Image (tube, helix red, strand yellow):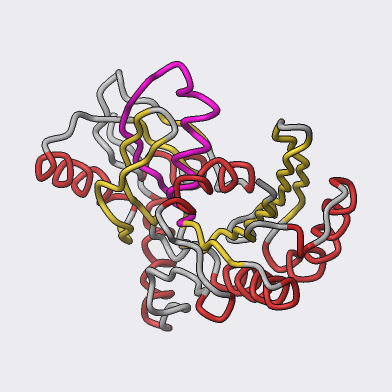
């Protein structure tokens, strides 16, 4: 199977190409700074990687992109590039849930010795909020247990306990890019057995997920590919910004009791 995948929804731009050569799957990868810079370098980097792999766009079985949630600008960039390339090459597009890609990256990088498990994926949503979703894996096969939601860092523990009680789940692994950002504000109430794994939705993770998603019929024609947004608004109001600033200043001036 020949596949192109890319994700630009976080601080990192990740691109990968998979090509079947003599019955073996080979992988070419490229990583660079994401964010606003992704829109200027994405297409050139894709074409360079395809050239390294000796593939033309019309030889692809599908184009996969990280559909979100994530940076609004990054998601729109990835979706529009996937659509444009797919239109010209007449191939289908596979939108992939970015939180699922985070879970898969954590499984592949740190949980490969476990035959099954539960991963809660977390991505920084900015504006003092976190995107969260929970998945179960058995080997490379994934099942969504709790769909994407938006919570405040300090409310994450309450959210996780409610979700675990509702689904009768044990505490599992947390994975994402929020641990260094929010630190102790992530009140998750973890037991010592709970692992926290730094992970991003990489293009390689999209490629590993692609066979299951393609078999499930989730590839679409280019015109039907859409980003996945969880947050409805893109900017804080003046009052919200003022409240956040006041809370930050208050936290910085609190002197712990001795």
Q: Nearer the viewer, residue 223 or 45?
A: 223
Residue 12 x, y percent position in the rendering: 67, 52
Q: Residue at x 75, y 47 (%)?
A: 31
* Quarter of the picture holding the C terminus: top left
Q: Is residue 36 magenta?
A: no
The image quadrant of residue 58 is: bottom right
The image quadrant of residue 137 is: top left
In this view, 140 is above or below 94: above
Q: Nearer the viewer, residue 175 or 80?
A: 80
Q: Is residue 116 magenta?
A: yes
Residue 177 x, y percent position in the rendering: 51, 45
In this view, 189 is above or below 41: above
Q: Residue furthest toward the front? A: 22
Please indicate whether residue 83 sits to the left or right of residue 42 in the image. Answer: left
Q: Residue at x 16, y 39 (%)?
A: 164
Q: Residue at x 63, y 42 (%)?
A: 204
Please indicate whether residue 4 sits to the left or right of residue 196 in the image. Answer: right
Please indicate whether residue 5 sits to the left or right of residue 235 in the image. Answer: right
Q: Residue at x 51, y 45 (%)?
A: 211
In this view, 169 is above or below 88: above
Residue 104 x, y percent position in the rendering: 48, 39
Q: Which residues are magenta?
A: 97-123
Residue 196 x, y percent position in the rendering: 42, 30
């Amino acid at each position: 199977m020949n596949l192109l995948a890319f994700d630009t929804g976080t601080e990192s731009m990740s691109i990968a190409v998979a090509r079947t050569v003599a019955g073996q799957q080979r992988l070419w990868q490229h990583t660079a700074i994401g964010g606003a810079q992704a829109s200027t370098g994405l297409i050139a980097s894709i074409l360079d990687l395809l050239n390294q792999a000796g593939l033309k766009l019309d030889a692809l079985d599908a184009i996969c992109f990280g559909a979100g949630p994530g940076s609004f600008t990054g998601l729109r960039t990835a979706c529009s590039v996937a659509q444009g390339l797919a239109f010209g090459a007449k191939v289908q597009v596979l939108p992939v849930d970015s939180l699922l890609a985070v879970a898969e990256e954590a499984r592949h990088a740190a949980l490969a010795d476990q035959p099954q498990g539960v991963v809660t994926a977390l991505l920084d949503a900015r504006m003092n909020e976190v995107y969260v979703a929970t998945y179960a894996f058995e080997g490379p096969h994934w099942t969504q247990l709790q769909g994407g939601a938006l919570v405040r860092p300090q409310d994450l523990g309450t959210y996780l306990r409610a979700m675990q009680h509702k689904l009768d789940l044990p505490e599992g692994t947390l994975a994402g890019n929020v641990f260094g950002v929010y630190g102790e504000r992530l009140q998750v109430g973890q037991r010592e057995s709970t692992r926290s794994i730094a992970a991003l939705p990489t293009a390689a993770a999209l490629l590993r997920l692609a066979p299951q998603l393609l078999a499930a019929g989730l590839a679409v024609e280019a015109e039907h590919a859409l980003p996945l947004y969880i947050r409805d608004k893109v900017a804080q109001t003046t009052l919200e910004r003022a409240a956040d600033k006041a809370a930050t200043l208050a936290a910085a001036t609190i002197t712990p009791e001795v």
